[in-house]
Image: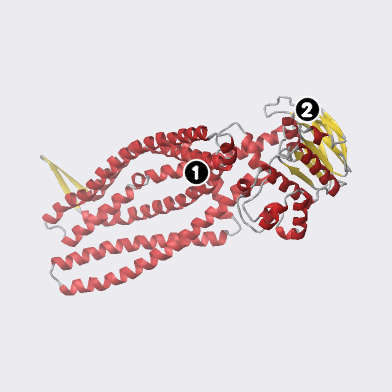
Amino acid sequence: MNHQENFFIKFMRLAGPFWRSKNSFIIWAETVLLIGLTVMQIELAVYITQWNAALFDAIEQRSMAGVKTQAVVLMLIFIGSITITTVHLIVKRRLLIGWRTWLTEKVIAKWIERGRHYQITLLSQNDHDNPDGRIAEDIRIATEDAIALSHSLFYCLLMLASFAQILWGISGRVVFEFGSVSIPVLGYLVWIAISYSICASIFGWWMGKPMTSATHSRQTQEANFRHDLIDIQNHSQAIAFIRGEINEKERLLDSFRAIIASYAEQTTSWIRIQIFTSGYSVASMALPILVASPRYIAGAISLGMLIQSVQAFQHMVSALSWPVDNMAQIATWRTSVERVLGFMNALDHLERDISDLNARQIHVNEANVSALKFNNVRLEGQEGEKLSSVVNHQINAGEHVLIADQANNGAKLFKAIAGLWPWGSGQIEIPAGQATFFMPPKPYLPAKSLFEAICYPKAKAAFDQVEVEKKLEQVGQKALIHQLNRVDAWADVLSNEQQQCLGLVRALLHRPQWIFVQEALDSLPPDDEAKMLKLLAHELPHAGILTITHQPAAQAFHQRKLKI
């Protein structure tokens, strides 16, 4: 029970503030309107049972006038039902997309800020995998199904209260005789409905228990399979060059076999549920007529009241059977909620880890200095293991410095400067107001027009096309000029050499004061890499350039080395 409470408390802490957000007045207005429309739906359902009773009484009495009257009433019910249902759907869907939008923005903001989307991949825990599925799909299910389930539960509670009262009145007083003992029972149909529903709910819940874990397993394996497919697509050229298709085929088939295993587990759970629901539906259809017919046969109620009692019984059982009817949806919803909570917990865990470091972390500050300074900087692993010696160094504007020693540690030093690697100690001072620019081994080229991809992260309006064309000529990519307005997946279309040249064009356009080149030109021939570095220095003579490279020709470009 405590685990259940913790689950709902955590979910409401995550999603509940939606009702206190900046649009809270509109949100509460929609919520209250949805509640009011739900009450109207119940009142309409109650009125329909009364209409049914009146119709069958008219039929039993062979009253044509009564039938005509009920036909007119049916038209009014028809119009009212359509109106209420349509407005209810509109309000409900507005609330659904509003909640999903709010939670999606909240999760994305937490995930994408300050490089957390990268840092979270460094965690050893596995409850942050497939962020795309958790944000796109699990948030949708968590919010939409929460409202759907809450609405259906509220509807069932209203239905239970309304139809229990009707059924109690129709049941009257029945005397059960056991030999010489007579036991009068009031509202016997109500007690039968409650007993039947409780027994069915307990048995149904037991039959459906395995569905939660089976659904979680299935969703995880499906997400892993999609991830593997995307991974192969993103690296298709490299796989094709080294003829790795057989390995990737086996990887995909292994991933799909895991889906088949989880599918079989889910099928077993579905079979259990189907066995129960099939028998339950048959019993629910016949039981109300069997238990109510003795009063009709005895002449205590009319045909209309018999039909009304059957409908009231079915409505009441339906309301009491809410847990059974929603087992699968609850399982799916809870699984998605747990995946979203797990993702947010992983982000919180990362935040705590970084915050708990305190003095035991690398501090990066903008300072009123003219040089890039490393004060007692030591790189460490996430478990505290030492990765580098202590660095005390100053790099002046316009200097070209080669990062020596292990390339992996050089990459971590660049991440530390960018604020992505807090593990370690010491202080890095960056001149205030001076822009930094990091050139990774493979630049990110979004699937937009080539012009926009080159200008990223700035908008294309920030640069003149003539200037971009000039830079493309300078890096030897004049052939790409006619494709500037073409939209494509450039990371798949262009060669590594072309992509690295575009990364250089991007740096030249942005004109930063500090440039960090992490094997960003290594795909070029050695002489061309040195040539591109000289171009960078010529175009940005006052920029400090720190480089990680393994090409001897490029190493000669640098004025000195920084050993870490």
217 relative position to 374: left or right: left
Q: Secondary structure at mark 1?
A: helix
The amino acid pointed to by label 1 is Val
Q: Disc 1 or 2, which lies upstream in sequence? A: 1
Is residue 464 visible from the viewing direction of this image? no
351 relative position to 169: left or right: right
Q: Count all numbered tags in the image, as a single digit.
A: 2
Judge by depth and name the residue closer to the eye, 257 or 190. 257
Q: Is residue 450 above or below residue 429?
A: below
Residue sitting at x 66%, y 56%: 483
Q: Say whether marks 1 and 2 touch (CB < 8 Å).
A: no
Judge by depth and name the residue closer to the eye, 84 or 126. 126
Residue 539 badge = none
Q: Position of residue 17 (x, y in %)?
A: 57, 51
Is residue 156 visible from the viewing direction of this image? yes
Q: Which of the 4 quarters of the picture holds residue 561?
A: top right
Judge by depth and name the residue closer to the eye, 396 or 533. 533
Disc 1 or disc 2, which is closer to the eye?
2
179 relative position to 393: left or right: left
Q: Secondary structure at mark 2?
A: loop
301 relative position to 366: left or right: left
Residue sitting at x 70%, y 26%: 384
The amino acid pointed to by label 2 is Asp
The alpha-carbon separation of the residues under discs 1 and 2 comes to: 46 Å
Q: Position of residue 320 (x, y in %)?
A: 32, 48
Q: Quadrant of the N terminus?
A: top left
Q: Is residue 311 above or below residue 111?
A: below
Mark 2, residue position: 405
Mark 1, residue position: 337
Q: Position of residue 444 (x, y in %)?
A: 67, 46
